Structures are given as structure tokens and as C-alpha cells.
Image (cartoon, rainbow, N blue to C red):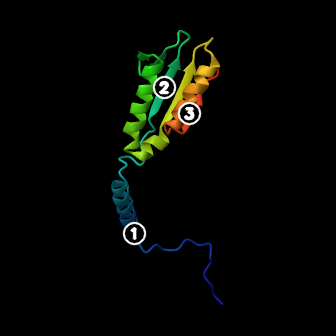
């Protein structure tokens, strides 16, 4: 008997141009302009020896950084996907008490941030 080879490529029901058109429509519907997902927001927090914190180039004391974390979590909570995808990098200066860093990380976790990275000294 003459059976077709199962490994041989089959003719597609859709011509190539229709497949690309379908891909382009799906890409437009997904909300991505070039096929890549939206970049994750990065938040860098520096912990200084003098007891202050730096976020976006501005210095904050303990109470100020607490308010800023609360403001960030509230603004990102409106769009839960941003809150879940936000990456926070905590960078302590040399000589910083690591207990302050752990308290900051605990406060960020309580606020709903999940991806927190602490730089080693």
C-alpha cells in the first residue's frame, strides 16, 4: 500500500499571508506594540548611613519614606499587574545597620510589593 509519510510537511489550509495577518491582528488586540511585554517598573531605594533614604534622586527621612512607599503602593494598586510586576532594589551604603534594611524590606512586603532585591554590601 501507498501510505503518506507522517513526517512529511502537510499543506496548510491558510496561506502564509493570512497567517501573518492573523498574527498582526492578535498582536494589536494584545496591546503590545512590538510583541514584547510592557517593561516592569524598577524602583531603586538607597539606604544611607546618616539615617536617610534616597528614592528617585530625592532624600527622605524614616517617616517620609514610609509615606512614599504608601503612595507608591496605592498608585500601583489601581493596576494590580503593575504592583505584582514592580521590582524594587534596595541598596544599602557600606556601614548601614542591616536591621534598618530588613525593616524597610518588611515594610515593602506589607505594602504588597513582591519582588524585592537587596544588594549585598
Cα separation, mark 1 vs mark 2, equals 49 Å
Quadrant for the N terminus in the image: bottom right
Eye-nearest disc, 1 or 2: 2
Residue 55 appears in the figure: no
Between residues 14 and 90, which one lies in front from this camera angle?
90
Q: Note whether residue 101 is visible.
A: yes
Q: Residue at x 47, y 37 (%)?
A: 86
- C-alpha span from label 1 to label 3: 47 Å
Q: Is residue 9 left or right of residue 24?
A: right
Q: Nearer the viewer, residue 90 or 42?
A: 90
For label 2, the SS is strand
Q: Name the residue under label 3.
A: 116
Local packing at callout 1 (Cα closer than 10 Å; few below 14, some 14-19, many 20+) is: few
Q: Residue placed at 62% from the left, 76% from the top?
A: 6
Q: Give the SS element for disc 1.
A: loop
Residue farthest along the bottom direction in this orientation: 1
Q: Which of marks 1 and 2 is nearer the N terminus?
A: 1
Residue 91 appears at what percent x and percent y? 56, 21
Q: Residue at x 58, y 26 (%)?
A: 103
Q: Mark number for residue 114? A: none
Q: In this view, does 85 lie above or below 66?
A: below
Q: Between marks 3 and 2, how big is the CA–CA gap?
A: 10 Å
Say the numbered circle drawn on residue 15.
Answer: 1
Residue nearest the viewer, comparing 93 with 104: 104
Q: In which quarter of the image is residue 76?
A: top left
Task: Give residue 2's position: percent from left, percent from top.
Answer: 63, 87
- In-front residue for pair 81/67: 67
Image quarter of the C terminus? top right
Q: Is mark 3 on a helix, strand or loop?
A: strand
Residue with the mark numbered 2? 44
Q: Which of marks 1 and 3 is in front?
A: 3
Amino acid at each position: 500500500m501507498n501510505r503518506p509519510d507522517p513526517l512529511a510537511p502537510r499543506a496548510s489550509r491558510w496561506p502564509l499571508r493570512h497567517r501573518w495577518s492573523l498574527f498582526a491582528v492578535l498582536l494589536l488586540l494584545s496591546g503590545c506594540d512590538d510583541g514584547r511585554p510592557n517593561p516592569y517598573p524598577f524602583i531603586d531605594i538607597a539606604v544611607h548611613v546618616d539615617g536617610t533614604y534616597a528614592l528617585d534622586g530625592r532624600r527622605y527621612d524614616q517617616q517620609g519614606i514610609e509615606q512614599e512607599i504608601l503612595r507608591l503602593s496605592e498608585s500601583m494598586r489601581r493596576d494590580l499587574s503593575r504592583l505584582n510586576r514592580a521590582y524594587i532594589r534596595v541598596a544599602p551604603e557600606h556601614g548601614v545597620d542591616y536591621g534598618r534594611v530588613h525593616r524597610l524590606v518588611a515594610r515593602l512586603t506589607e505594602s504588597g510589593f513582591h519582588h524585592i532585591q537587596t544588594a549585598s554590601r
